[in-house]
Image: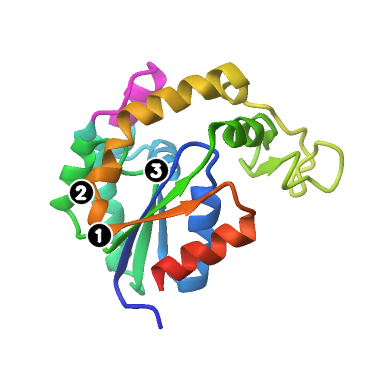
Amino acid sequence: MVNQNLKLIFLGPPGSGKGTQGNRIAKELKLDFISMGDILRKEIKERSKLGKEVSNYVESGKLVPDKLILELIEKQVDRAKSSDYKGFILDGFPRTLEQANGLKNITEIDKVIYLKCNIETIVKRLSARRTCPKCARVYNLVTNLPRKDELCDDCGVKLEHRVDDCESVIRKRMEIYETSTSPLLGFYASQLNVIDADLGIEAVYRKAKEAIV
């Protein structure tokens, strides 16, 4: 039986599968899935007050300040609590110790799922990733092929290979990840559950769910 008001964080490097696994578990356990990337895109699209501030940083290629990121997270957590609330999963947040400390003032966290993944596995996965430019659906030419050629199943649009999914950029992103995010593992040591993300999708899913429930 799943506890009510379950508050979780999914951590892991790009390509570890935290978004895929977190989204799947959130749907099954009826938790709100809060993705920082989705939040930023939504606020910018809606041109909210926060969205306009965030857009100025994004469009100029600068990092969004922690203060704004924390405001966005607090807004989403409050929104989740006002719905048929059973808890939430945070994906892509926090990314730094500063953000983790700020999050403590917004909400408690019950468990942290860390998907540990070998860099060569990540390079292989992200190099094969393709995205629909119209609906943003993500495919993988190794593990999640579209039904026809390299066309989106939903839109029929030619899939794109993101510039930041080339090997040299992936390895650079991993260096940045290790520097900024790895310290979070110590911060959340008492709540941390480490899962080998090199395993298959179903095996990772089972282990993540076991750690949660």
Q: Secondary structure at mark 2?
A: helix
Q: Is residue 192 visible?
A: yes
Q: Are marks 2 and 1 in contact (CB under 8 Å)?
A: yes
Query: In the depicted view, which residue is nearer to us: 126 or 160?
Result: 126
The residue carrying mark 3 is 92
Q: Secondary structure at mark 1?
A: loop
Which amino acid does the dot numbered 3 rest on?
Gly
- Among numbered discs 2 and 3, the one appearing first in the sequence: 3
Q: Give the tally of numbered discs.
A: 3
Q: Residues within 10 Å of mark 1 (few under 14, many from 20)?
A: some
Quadrant (top left/top right/bottom left/bottom right) for the C terminus: bottom left
- Report the span colored magenta: 53-65
The residue carrying mark 1 is 109
Q: Nearer the viewer, mark 2 or mark 1?
A: 1
Q: Is residue 71 visible?
A: no
Q: Position of residue 153 (x, y in %)?
A: 77, 48
Q: Residues within 10 Å of mark 3 (few under 14, many from 20)?
A: some
Label 2, label 1: how many angstroms apart (C-alpha)? 9 Å
Q: Are marks 2 and 3 in contact (CB under 8 Å)?
A: no
Which amino acid does the dot numbered 1 rest on?
Ile
Query: Residue drawn at (51%, 41%), measured in percent from left and top?
Result: 117
Which amino acid does the dot numbered 2 rest on?
Leu
Q: Are marks 3 and 1 in contact (CB under 8 Å)?
A: no
Above or below, comparing residue 161 to residue 213 in the picture: above
Query: Residue drawn at (27%, 35%), measured in percent from left and top?
Result: 96
Label 2, label 3: how many angstroms apart (C-alpha)? 13 Å
The residue carrying mark 2 is 103
Q: Position of residue 199 (x, y in %)?
A: 60, 52
Q: Position of residue 89 (x, y in %)?
A: 38, 58
Label 3, label 1: how many angstroms apart (C-alpha)? 15 Å
